[in-house]
Image (cartoon, grey):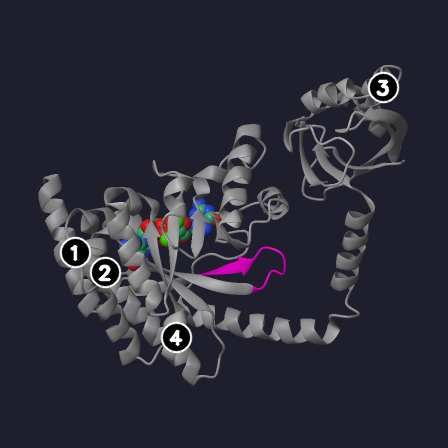
């Protein structure tokens, strides 16, 4: 069979699948990066055939995208989402906003917003419960004016708008600033080095900082590891979507997650003053207040990032990168009589040796040149910490300046 007949077959089969209700909306929860509470969910289509085999979107979406048939799927999905939300409401289970994917093909459709209102109103779903997801590439394909008008019309009706897959296309952050979107979803390809690569961290950090300046909600997609979560948190990323927390799931299972998440809130409210989690948070707040410079170092991988770097005497060090370069740079800012002591104490080789000897921490007092060209006494203490999920030797470095 040729590729063309293959594709025609898929188009016919998908139409039949709607009628047989074989296309389902799955829901993937999205969590607040700090509190771990579910704040949103993304609706993702799944084709479940009569015999139970599941066809993933990658096998039919590209074919639908090639014709206008993708629009039919998107409208079908909005209806499925509205039905699921309505059922859930009738069961008295609280729900979160649901983000629905829309193809770029809708942008030129003048009656898009009218149709979206018509569907949601038919099911009696509040507009704030639906978010429209547009891929970054949709922004490039159309004129800025056209995209801007499309987004404004959607938001004027009370829906929110997210730009999806940010970082995959050619669009710049500048383009994002010209369109009044609510949320920026950062593509998972930007995390594929597990945040261990300096360039990857710099790219993520700059996107997040820029997005936060524009007051956008940021979502990192495809978060699979604790390292990724840790780094994203330190960059202030607001929301997390990924297998680390939850995979896309059928609506029945999603309902259970909504129930247990709502309970979690209740328990947290009751215990918020005394729970161990809140005590740990208070402890962290205290440590963050006490030290102007806190660095997370992975000695094994020669990497570091600043967890806090605010109000310290010198601010010339880059916020993430190769640790040995950080030491060379920092030695250069020390008083000439202290530079060698600093370098010797904190070079990777000697820190590793101290760790091997079983020392809990190493500490020095040095004089460092501040941004204002004044030498100040600085105490640096590096604590060796154990990460249960990794063999890597990790260090938390706490520094403060006197005078
Ligand atoms: P997307 O919009 O970027 O959706 C996120 C994809 O990442 C989903 O793939 C999700 O299952 C996957 N994902 C989420 N967390 C992780 C993770 O931690 N690790 C990994 N490896 N993957 C993760 P899925 O469900 O296969 O969907 C693929 C794409 O198909 C979606 O990408 C979206 O572009 C498209 N799609 C799905 N349903 C619809 C729809 O109803 N309409 C339109 N227009 N596109 C849809
Ligand atoms: Ca999406
Ligand atoms: Ca995406």
Residue lying at 36% horizontally and 51% vertically, measured from the top left: 179
Asked whether the residues under the numbered discs 1 and 4 touch, taking CB atoms below 8 Å apart as contact, a structural biologist would say no
Relative height, residue 330 to residue 20 (above, below)? above
SS category of the residue bearing label 2: helix
Depth check: give the residue in front, 320 or 19.
Answer: 320
Residue matched to label 1: 69
How many tags in the picture?
4
Relative height, residue 341 to residue 231 (above, below)? above
Tell me, for residue 85, which label it has, or none. 4
72 on left or right of 355: left
Residue matched to label 2: 73
Quarter holding the C terminus is top right
Q: Residues within 10 Å of mark 2 (few under 14, many from 20)?
A: many
Foreground: disc 3 or disc 4: 3
Residue lying at 67% horizontally and 43% vertically, measured from the top left: 389
242 on left or right of 137: right
Determine which quarter of the picture holds residue 305.
top right
From this viewpoint, is residue 95 visible?
A: yes
């Amino acid at each position: 069979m040729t590729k063309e007949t293959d594709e025609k077959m898929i188009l016919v089969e998908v139409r039949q699948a709607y009628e047989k209700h074989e296309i389902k909306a799955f829901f993937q929860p999205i969590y607040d990066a700090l509190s771990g509470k579910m704040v949103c969910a993304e609706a993702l289509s799944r084709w479940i055939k009569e015999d139970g085999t599941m066809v993933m979107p990658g096998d039919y979406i590209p074919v639908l995208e090639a014709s206008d048939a993708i629009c039919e799927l998107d409208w079908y999905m909005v209806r499925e989402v509205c039905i699921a939300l309505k059922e859930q409401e009738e069961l008295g289970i609280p729900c979160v906003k649901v983000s629905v994917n829309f193809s770029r093909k809708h942008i030129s459709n003048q009656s898009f917003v009218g149709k979206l209102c018509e569907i949601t109103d038919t099911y009696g779903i509040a507009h704030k419960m639906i978010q429209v997801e547009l891929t970054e590439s949709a922004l490039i394909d159309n004129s800025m004016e056209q995209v801007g008008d499309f987004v404004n019309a959607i938001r004027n009706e009370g829906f929110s708008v997210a730009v999806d897959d940010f970082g995959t296309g050619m669009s710049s952050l500048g383009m994002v600033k010209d369109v009044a979107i609510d949320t920026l979803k950062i593509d998972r390809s930007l995390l594929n080095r597990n945040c261990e690569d300096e360039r990857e961290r710099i790219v993520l950090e700059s996107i997040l900082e820029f997005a936060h300046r524009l007051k956008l909600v940021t979502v990192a997609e495809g978060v699979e590891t604790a390292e990724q979560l840790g780094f994203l948190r330190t960059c202030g990323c607001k929301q997390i979507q990924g297998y680390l927390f939850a995979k896309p799931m059928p609506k029945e299972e999603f309902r259970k997650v909504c129930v247990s998440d709502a309970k979690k809130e209740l328990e947290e409210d009751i215990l918020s003053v005394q729970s161990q989690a809140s005590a740990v948070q208070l402890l962290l707040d205290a440590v963050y207040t006490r030290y102007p410079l806190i660095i997370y170092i992975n000695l094994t991988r020669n990497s570091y990032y600043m967890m806090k770097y605010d109000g310290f005497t010198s601010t010339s060090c880059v916020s993430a990168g190769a640790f040995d370069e950080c030491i060379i740079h920092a030695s250069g800012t020390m008083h000439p009589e202290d530079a060698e002591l600093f370098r010797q104490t904190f070079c990777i080789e000697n820190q590793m040796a101290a760790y091997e000897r079983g020392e809990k921490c190493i500490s020095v007092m040095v004089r460092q040149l501040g941004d204002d060209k004044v030498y100040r006494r600085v105490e640096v203490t590096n604590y060796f910490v154990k990460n249960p999920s990794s063999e890597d030797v990790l260090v938390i470095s706490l520094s403060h300046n006197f005078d």
